[in-house]
Amino acid sequence: MRNAAIWSMAMAGAAVAMALGGPVEPAVAAGATLVVAPTGDDSGPGTLDRPLRTIQRAVDLARPGDTISVRGGTYALTDNITIATSGTASQPITLSPYQGERVVVDGEKLPAGHTPVGGSIPRAERGAVHMEASHWRISGLEIVNGPYGVYCDGCNSNVFARLSTHDNYESGFQLQGASSNNQILNLDSYGNRDPRKNGESADGLAVKEGSGSGNLVRGARLWNNVDDGFDAWKFASPITIENTVAYGNGFNRWNFPDFAGDGNGFKLGGGSPAPAVSHTVRGSVSFKNAKHGFTDNGNPGSLALSRNSTYANAGTGFDADVSAGTARLTGNLAIADQRPAAVGSGTVADGNSWNLGGTWNAASVLSTDPAPLTGPRSADGSLPKAPAFLVPRSGTAVGARF
């Protein structure tokens, strides 16, 4: 079963590092490559000419240092993909498409996705990809129609790059539990909804209900999800978010009765009581959401929001009004929100558009058209260029730049 590598792990690691914009872990030793194809056979050796049939079979066989290379096609699941074996820091396990082919993981047939209103999803059935493992590099997959797209609980030191998680029956990507040092890079997560809860909890990306230092989100786009774009509810350790986009969240596109979607672009805390956590958000934008652009959601911690932009949110652009909070807002831009900011007595706000005086409206920026930013990604997976979007005509150094 454990055939000699068709491609060395070092070459696979280099390709992933290039897609991520640079190396993310130390060089790794070569391991075996397991090939999967829709026409394969799970009793085969997993070679290029005799591939395996299911991703799960390859996951079960993989050991530290191995690569799982998936041929293009749609993989319709009858049971979720469960990842329980970890790699190591020097020998992570890689899961990615073969030579950039389009791989769709479809969870429509998983019964947990069709849980009735008021029901709950058993923990083991959460996610088209259910992961409780560390030291993986997973990239380039499209994950749809699952009971969650990716559900990762107790996951450490993983790299998730260039994933697309959309039209799932819960959050597109959820990281929770004791999880640290994960990188979520260039994620597109959209159209996720939760009929069983009438829109109460399906986010584009949720890092919630847990703790763990060193988690990073960069280059994500989170849009048209039924609840929030990003949700950090009850996550007790700082998260860093950079160069990320959230828009169009919280609208009832599915005609759910008793609609319960929140509609924040970035929800940066919450709980009863909400833990005090010092999340950092920089160079990001939130626009046309049903509620706030950025909200502390009751988090009394020292949030740091710098050089972010909001536009045309139905609520407040920057909602940081917890009186016990010690948030710091610097160099942010708010345009055409219901109100630009709500700042509590413990919050320091300086150099933001609402502090600078003058008129800040749609005419104050070069463009309010998001089309360049919402178009196809660059070849390396990075966000497309949008050099005029929400950039002040005056050249004032406030807001994000894309």
Image (tube, helix red, strand yellow):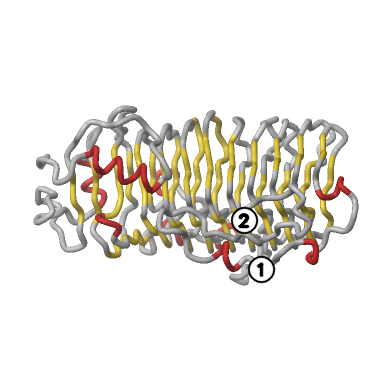
Q: Residue at x 75, y 43 (%)?
A: 331
Residue 127 coordinates in the image, percent (x, y): 42, 50
Is 140 or 360 nearer to us in this picture?
360
Is 381 or 367 nearer to us in this picture?
367
Q: Which mark is residue 192?
A: none
Q: Earlier in the sequence, mark 1 or mark 2?
A: 2
Measured in 3D between alpha carbons, the distance from the residue under mark 1 to the one under mark 2, in whole angstroms, is 15 Å
**Which part of the image, by quadrant, shows the N terminus?**
top left
Residue 381 coordinates in the image, percent (x, y): 43, 54
How many numbered circles are shown?
A: 2
**Which part of the image, by quadrant, shows the C terminus?**
bottom right
Q: Residue furthest right?
A: 357
Residue 350 coordinates in the image, percent (x, y): 82, 39
Q: Which mark is residue 246?
A: 2
Q: Is residue 165 left or right of residue 47?
A: right
Question: Would you name the residue on which mark 1 appears?
Answer: 369
Q: Nearer the viewer, mark 1 or mark 2?
A: 1
Sort mark 1 into few (<14), some (14-19) or many (20+) by Cα contacts within 10 Å. few
Residue type (three-letter) at the residue carrying disc 2: Ala
Q: Residue at x 53, y 63 (%)?
A: 191
Q: Secondary structure at mark 2?
A: strand
Residue 355 coordinates in the image, percent (x, y): 86, 45
> Quarter-wise, where is residue 78 in the image?
bottom left
Sort mark 2 into few (<14), some (14-19) or many (20+) by Cα contacts within 10 Å. many
Q: Is residue 92 left or right of residue 297?
A: left
- Circles 1 and 2, Cβ within 8 Å, touching? The answer is no
Check the image and report above or below for 366 versus 47: below
Q: Residue at x 29, y 61 (%)?
A: 101
Residue type (three-letter) at the residue carrying disc 1: Asp
